[in-house]
Image: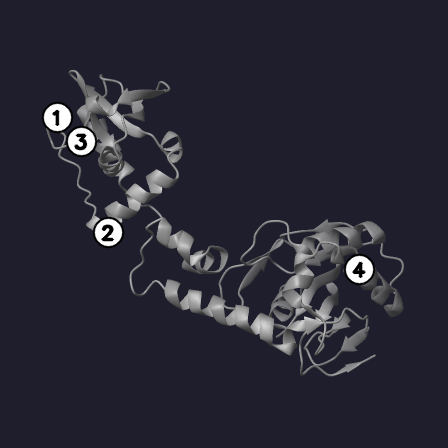
Amino acid sequence: MGNIVNTEIIPLSKIVGNRGQLEGLPRNPRIIKDDKFRMLCESIKSQPDMLYLRELLVYPSGSKFIVIGGNMRHKAMKQLGMTDAPCKVIPPDTPIEQLRQILLKDNSNYGDWDTEALAFDWESCEVMDCAIEFDDGSGYQENVEKKRRAWKRGHKSSEQRCDLVPRYAFHRSMDYGYLSCFKYSDEGYLLYDIKENEENMPLFADHAVKVLAHLGLRHLEGFCLVSAPKRRHKEHNFADGVCEIIAAKLGIPYYTDIIKVLNKNRTKPKMEWEPPKEKNIIFFDDILTTGSTMLACNALMEGFNVVNVIGINNHHSSSKTT
């Protein structure tokens, strides 16, 4: 079946479910429970255009078309009183062995849900509406509760705020030491809100450049800029925007994503990296809380000259000299 299969609109009266009527092809091995079937019907009813993005897979048999992939959707469409369906018509000369493979592969789930990503990046109602289920050991509900607790902390805790008043400091409490531009405060903006506002990127970049100048770093040939690795949000983020401005101001290269996190343990992160050609590195992180990310990154960069610059020092127990 090497040729392209186009979409055709076929009346539902001509489409029948796979009940094993085609010799050599067993009936569809998937079942759907009543509650899930109701959710499927609601999903199709609320977004019928999705049927054009994932058509039924049908095979011509006499005057009818047998559903090879999408039996549950076919059943739901009939329940909803729909009159026709977008279909991919499998060529009639397709061998029965290949039909068997198509049927099984269409019903297979090769991957697992990232329950942490679902809990933190998607609303619970969205997950429920899509009829996504997990076994008791998946950790999804536990991650949902973590999200709720984190949200409450972010809105109630004074430890998660900063007034964005520059307070340059050098901290010696961590194994490698670091420079910081701002400090946590009892009053001020929520850290989440600070990072959500792109207008804060130039502010962070300006003060990062100034704190480096106070340190005496003005001639930066042979330096590069590296940022802390991304965790949940893999796309361009706040730290990326700040680093791009810093790199432009200093005239040095910025290497994004050269450090990658291999596990989800925030206190003991496991990381790997692709070392840059420069031997002098300015490492930037927008907010430091426990310091575990900075320490893990610095451990990777043994053999390099590293200057750590932090936007907001949120590490409450650190000692420092200003």
Of badges 1 and 4, the one in the foreground is 4
Mark positioned earlier in the residue sequence (1 or 2): 1
Residue tagged 1: 22
Examine the rendered structure and indicate whether residue 198 appears above or below residue 105: below
Q: Are marks 3 and 1 in contact (CB under 8 Å)?
A: no
Estimate how packed mark 4 is, as few (under 14), some (14 to 19) or many (20 or more) residues with alpha carbons within 10 Å.
Answer: some
- For this rendering, which residue is in front, 102 or 155? 155
x and y percentages locating residue 11 in the rendered image = 26, 21
Mark positioned earlier in the residue sequence (1 or 4): 1
Q: CA distance from mark 1 to mark 4?
A: 68 Å
Examine the rendered structure and indicate whether residue 244 appears above or below residue 322: above
The answer to whether any part of residue 140 appears in the image is: yes
The answer to whether any part of residue 278 appears in the image is: no
Examine the rendered structure and indicate whether residue 219 appears above or below residue 78: below
Q: Are marks 1 and 2 in contact (CB under 8 Å)?
A: no
Q: Determine the secondary structure under disc 3.
A: loop
* Residue at 72 percent of width and 62 percent of height: 283
Mark positioned earlier in the residue sequence (4 or 3): 3
The quadrant in which residue 91 appears is top left
Q: CA distance from mark 3 to mark 2?
A: 20 Å
Residue tagged 2: 35
Q: CA distance from mark 3 to mark 1?
A: 11 Å
The residue at the far front in this view is: 81
Q: CA distance from mark 4 to mark 3?
A: 62 Å
Q: Amino acid at mark 1?
A: Leu
Residue 76 image label: none
Of badges 1 and 2, the one in the foreground is 2
